[in-house]
Amino acid sequence: MIRTWLGRIFGRAAKAQDDPKSLAQAKPQVLCASAIGLDLSGVSQAAMRTCETLQQAGFEAFVVGGGVRDLLLGRRPKDFDVATNATPEQVLAHFRRARSIGRRFQIVHVYFGRELIEVSTFRAMQAEAETDAHGRVLKDNVWGSQQEDAARRDFTVNALYLDPIGDQLLDYHEGYRDLQARTLRMIGDPATRYREDPVRMLRVARFAAKLGFNIEAQTRAPIAAMADLLTHVPAARLFDELLKLLTSGHSLACIQTLRTEGLHHGLLPLLDGIFASDAGERFIQQALSNTDARIAADKSISPGFLLAALLWPQVLAAWQTRLASGEHNTPALMAAADDVLEQQSDRLAIQKRFAADMREIWAMQIRFERCTGQAPFRLMEHLRFRAGFDFLLLRAQAGEDCEALASWWDSFVQADPLDREDLIQRAPQRPSSGARRNTRRRRRVQHASV
């Protein structure tokens, strides 16, 4: 009896919490930001000036989202977003260097030197929003109150509004409590929110891995059954989300979380290929670990290089198959590259500039095998030499049969001109890439009889 009574009470509470009208009417908990440990000096001057300018013009303006979350976690935010009750046109009128972007979700980019502040207008809860056949919202430019805007955000820890001028933190959905508990919780009914925007399932995996948070049970529960909704997301948007995941600084953990949640299988051909073989998985793990280490060291990374690494196991397998069937070395590699990229095109709109970088990096792996004459010197003049060389080192590091070649090139790159000539005399023999190579037959010269 008591258990039933308690179940009804908590059931009604949970239902009220998920009800859109109740969410949109939530009252915020107002906290003193500096008193709870948020260092206001961590807010960029550009974000401060944006909020100050809008507030002086009579509008509300708050730093919101990942910037606030990261400051509370003691991290250095990558960027800052501002939310306001000013419309995009009103925002544009108060900043000299600003432009409006987006159709489905209109926002304003405000520029301060090299820094960009993304300014969005509070969004309204839409009872009859324009959606596709699967429930994905197609148009989202109806302005509303701050309460509605908070209810529409994805996770509680991303729905914290910081007024850096007034030193106040507004918490509508117990995001600060979840932050302290290191819990990722969806605002509202998770199944409904995933249906509105399936990319949120990928964001769950990315944020859980990046922040080291636990995924709340109700937030996790619908993912396995709703994963197929990702097939209806535009390829360009999926590619953008994948890049965020891979360049998060926690790419290996993100991929592992995707696998745990069942989001890799049958959705993105690239992710399916990662786990196709033990050797391929080792290679990818090494590539992602190296990428995470570079980001942690504040070094630059190349999306083209990272994508080339992720697809290399598939390219290598296709290349070896073509060589075994009698095709020549270089044409076989480039045909394999085209086949693999074509397989990705239906689900991932890899930008042409990245695809061009990937092809060059792959093609250079053959040129590294030519260690005689002037070939090494010419190769070092190639625009993508460093990327191709790093890729060769990655292959050796991951256990491919090219350690001797990578070691020779490492010595060659660091040597002075005289030592390089000596190294060419001791160049390693060309390796076989794990498959038979064709050798060019000599032409027979027929002599005319007298």
Image (cartoon, rainbow, N blue to C red):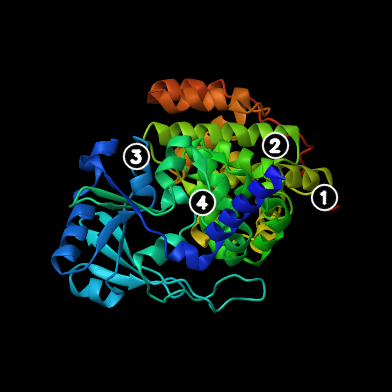
Q: Amino acid at mark 3?
A: Leu
Q: Amino acid at mark 1?
A: Gln
Q: Can residue 218 be seen at all in this image of the molecule?
A: yes
Position of residue 223 measured from the top left corner of the image (x, y, whole percent): 67, 52
| Residue hosting label 1 | 446
Q: Along the polypeptide, which appears first: circle 4 or circle 1?
A: 4
| Disc 4 to disc 1: CB gap under 8 Å | no
- Sequence-wise first label, 3 or 2: 3
Dot in front, 3 or 1: 3
In the orientation shown, which residue stands out farthest toward the front?
1
In this image, 203 relative to 398: left or right?
Answer: left
The residue singled out by tag 3 in the image is 72
Q: Decide which of 293, 434 is in the foreground and name it.
A: 293
Q: CA distance from mark 3 to mark 2?
A: 38 Å
Mark 2 or mark 4: whose residue is earlier in sequence: 4
How much space separates mark 1 and mark 2, taking CA atoms? 49 Å
Mark seen at residue 340: none
Q: Quadrant of residue 419?
A: top left
- Dot 2: few (<14), some (14–19), or many (≥20) neighbours within 10 Å? many
Alpha carbon separation for disc pair 3 and 4: 25 Å
Q: Comparing marks 1 and 2, which lies closer to the viewer?
A: 2
Query: Which quadrant is home to the N terminus?
Result: top right
User: Which residue carries the number 2 mark?
Assistant: 280
- What is the secondary structure assignment of the residue under circle 3? helix
Helix, strand or loop status at disc 4:
helix
Residue closer to the observer: 367 or 359: 359
User: Which residue is identified by label 4?
Assistant: 243
Q: Residue at x 55, y 60 (%)?
A: 16
